[in-house]
Image (cartoon, rainbow, N blue to C red):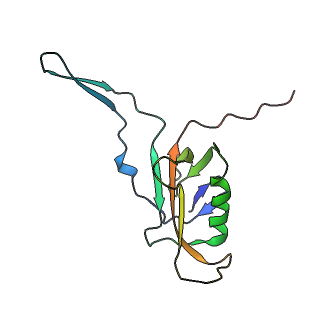
Amino acid sequence: MYITLDDVQLDDQLQWVNEFEHDAVAQTQERSITGKLLLQYAAAPLLHGREIDLRSNGGAWTPLSVVRQLEAMRDEPGRVMLLTLADDRQFHVIFNRTSGPPLTAEPVFREAYPTADSLYHINLRLLTVAAAPEPAQAS
C-alpha cells in the first residue's frame, strides 16, 4: 500500500509526525471581574485545519522525479488535493505555508549531478480543508 497525494505515489513509510497533536475540542479561557476562571468549550469536532506533517525521518526515500512533481503541485496557489494514507484514511489538503516551507527535500547521497532516480528525504507540510467543489456539468 502507498500514500498518494492526488495522483502522485509516495512511500508508505512517510511518518505523520504530528498526528496526535491535534485537539478536536476548542476552548477559551477568561477571568471574570471577581477573578473566577471562565471556560467555554466547543465539543463539536473541528473538521478542518488539522496539520498533517509527513516526514521521511530516515525511513523513506523519494526519487527526484517525484520531488519535482510535488514542487509543481506546491507552486499552484490554493490547490486542494486528496491525500490517501497507507491505511486508506483520506483527507482533502492544501500545502501549509504558515510556519515554514511546505516541501523540503534533502539528498540521501551527495551527488553533483542528480538524476530523476536520485533519492531524497522529504518533508511535506499539509493542512486539512473542505473538499474541492465538483466542476459544474455542462448542460
User: Is 3 positioned to the left or the right of 33 in the image?
Assistant: right
The residue furthest top is: 33
Task: Please tell me which residue is depicted at 14% across the width and 21% down the height of the picture.
Answer: 36
The residue at 57%/62% (across/down) is 2
Q: Name above or below for residue 92 compared with residue 110.
A: above
Q: What residue appears at the point 48 percent right and 66 percent down from the top-left corner?
A: 13
What percent of the width, then of the height, locates residue 82?
61, 47
- Residue 94, given in percent of the width and then of the height, sits at 57, 46
From the viewer's perspective, tell me whether residue 71 is left or right of residue 105: right
Q: Quadrant of residue 7?
A: bottom right
Q: Residue at x 81, y 31 (%)?
A: 137
Quarter of the figure that contains the C terminus: top right
Relative to 30, residue 66 above or below:
below
Judging depth in this view, the residue of 112 and 14 nearest the camera is 112
The image position of residue 3, as x and y in percent, is 56, 59
With respect to residue 9, does 43 lie above or below?
above
Counting from the top left corner in percent of width and height, residue 22 is at 37, 44
Q: Please name whichever residue, 134 or 69, is drawn nearer the observer in this view of the structure.
A: 69
- Left of 126 or right of it: where is 27? left
